[in-house]
Amino acid sequence: MAHHQLKHVLSTKQFLNKRLLANLFRTADELARKDKTGRLHKILTGKILASVFYEPSTRTRFSFEAAMLKLGGTVITTESASHFSSVIKGESLPDTIKIISGYVDVIVLRHHEEGSAQIAAEASSVPIINAGDGSGEHPTQALLDLYTLKKELGRTDKLKIALIGDLLYGRTIHSLLNLLMLYKNTKIYLVSPPQLRLPAKYKSQLKQNGIYFEETSDLYKNLDEMDVLYVTRIQKERFGNLRQYEKLKGSYVINKVALKRLKRHAIIMHPLPRVKEVAAEVDDDPRAAYFRQARNGLYIRMALLDLIIKK
Ligand code: NCD
């Protein structure tokens, strides 16, 4: 896919192109370098980003907004968009987006319904960036995740990756899997309680793409072979039945005991926020990559804004 064809960012399926990814990562590297030496160009002066969030967020919203500000643009925001309309139905979203897209140059949208970003894109006259649509996707998170693999391990292929936690509802998992399918020699270990297994549609895509994967509920089964632990929060807000959540919430904890089993050069990632699935005692271990990962988000989001906002 050529750069100029990338209008919206809705799914990581738009990024299944190694050259596009390499360009994006190179731009992120360059922006990081310039930021650190105070030499960033204000390439987005006069441009406006609207962040429209119907679900809570800290990192995603702030990192997009900081990215925009650092590039010279400005930001308008509504962080609790759902409070403005008690029943969010499909029909209200296109109207909202139609209006906002008349005011700004890019819209970052987080919404609780799967498919909402696509609906918004159809109504919008400016690029829509999907910052999470229910249990669907969270493409910019997956891009920064892949960028983190590259930076931390020096490669994105020939990896054994354990995806741990809520594989059913975790949208960062869904988006990341699309990208990992680009690398045929990746081995994926799906670690979840039986109730929170990866949806069948993703498993059949893994099969179609010839990607090796295993499902287990036992965190310790292959732990000592893993290059990457990608740990996720059990997505409380997606449960209809909170008793079920209570039962599953403590399923996995990465702690010092787990660290002992892990390879010396493995890394632990987490999109954050964590609840208790990564113990604080892990934070000081050099393999704990999640805070570096969050920081990488700033530069990936700057690179994406640079790529999609018309100048
Ligand atoms: C994730 C999300 O919103 O899907 N958070 C984030 O953007 N880093 C993960 C989560 O909420 O568990």
Image: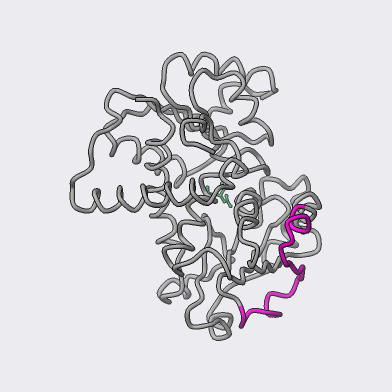
Q: Position of residue 215 (x, y in %)?
A: 77, 68
- On the image, which quarter does residue 310 sit in? top left
Is 276 covered by the magenta stretch? no
Please give the name of the residue rendered at 73% of the width and 67% of the height, measured from the top-left corner.
212
Pick the residue in front: 58 or 240: 58
Please give the name of the residue rendered at 59% of the width and 25% of the height, measured from the top-left corner.
121
Q: Quadrant of the C terminus?
A: top left
Q: Horizontally, is 48 left or right of 184 in the view?
A: left
Pick the residue in front: 296 or 234: 296
Q: Position of residue 45 (x, y in %)?
A: 27, 27
For the record, the magenta segment spans 205-225
- Residue at the outermost left position: 38
Q: Position of residue 152 (x, y in %)?
A: 43, 67
Tell me if residue 194 comes above or below residue 129 in the rendering. Answer: below
Q: Horizontally, is 116 left or right of 73 in the view?
A: right
Please give the name of the residue rendered at 68% of the width and 44% of the height, measured from the top-left corner.
135
Please give the name of the residue rendered at 29% of the width and 36% of the height, measured from the top-left corner.
71
Q: Quadrant of the N terminus?
A: top right
- On the image, which quarter does residue 69 sit in? top left
- On the image, which quarter does residue 117 sit in? top right
Is 218 covered by the magenta stretch? yes
Pick the residue in front: 21 or 75: 21
Q: Position of residue 89 (x, y in %)?
A: 70, 23
- Residue at the outermost bottom position: 260
Number of on-image labels: 0
Q: How is the image coloured?
A: one colour
Tell me if residue 20 comes above or below residue 247 in the rendering. Answer: above
